[in-house]
Amino acid sequence: MIKEIKYFIYIFTIILFFFLTIKFYLSETNIKNTYRSINYKDENININDLDLKVLKNNTVDIIEYVDNQLDDEEEYKFWELLQIN
């Protein structure tokens, strides 16, 4: 008998939790507050967007290509490269 009552209390608590959670998230006050919060953040983004400075593009010809081709006939060895320096 006590075991059944214990299970009933567990199940009742779980169902009550889900019911209250769904009731809160689907309530009109929560929906209004969520919408107001999103709308307020969008307005702040639009206001701050006007204050942003646009930087000039200074990346034209930033990459320099070098036409340094190694001869295929020369084979370098690692130890020899160290000894040269």
Image: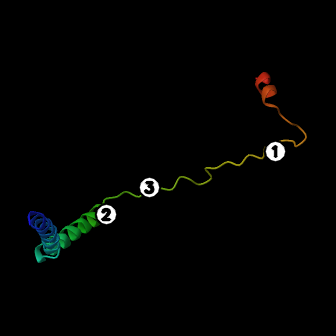
Which residue carries the number 3 mark?
A: 55
Please indicate whether residue 56 sits to the left or right of residue 73 in the image: left
- Are dots 3 and 2 in contact, CB under 8 Å? no
* Vertical side of 64 occupied by 36: above or below: below
Q: Quadrant of residue 11?
A: bottom left
Single out the residue that lies furthest toward the front. Answer: 1
Q: Quadrant of residue 28?
A: bottom left
> Is disc 1 surrounded by few (<14), some (14 to 19) or many (20+) residues within 10 Å?
few
- Closer to the camera, 76 or 21? 21
Q: Residue at x 12, y 64 (%)?
A: 3
Single out the residue that lies furthest toward the right. Answer: 73
Q: Earlier in the sequence, mark 1 or mark 3?
A: 3
Q: Position of residue 49 (x, y in %)?
A: 32, 63
The disc labelled 1 sits on which kind of residue? Gln
- Are dots 1 and 3 in contact, CB under 8 Å? no
Q: Residue at x 74, y 46 (%)?
A: 66
The span from disc 1 to disc 3 (Cα, nearest Å) is 37 Å
Please indicate whether residue 61 sits to the left or right of residue 18 in the image: right
Which quadrant of the figure contains the N terminus? bottom left
Q: Earlier in the sequence, mark 1 or mark 2?
A: 2
- Closer to the camera, 72 or 64? 72
> Is disc 3 surrounded by few (<14), some (14 to 19) or many (20+) residues within 10 Å?
few
The disc labelled 2 sits on which kind of residue? Leu
Q: Residue at x 37, y 57 (%)?
A: 53
Which residue carries the number 2 mark?
A: 50
* Vertical side of 76 occupied by 9: above or below: below
The span from disc 3 to disc 2 (Cα, nearest Å) is 14 Å
* Vertical side of 27 occupied by 54: above or below: above
Circle 2: element type: helix
Q: Earlier in the sequence, mark 3 or mark 2?
A: 2
Q: In this rendering, which labeled residue sits more in front, label 1 or label 3?
A: 1
Which residue carries the number 1 mark?
A: 69
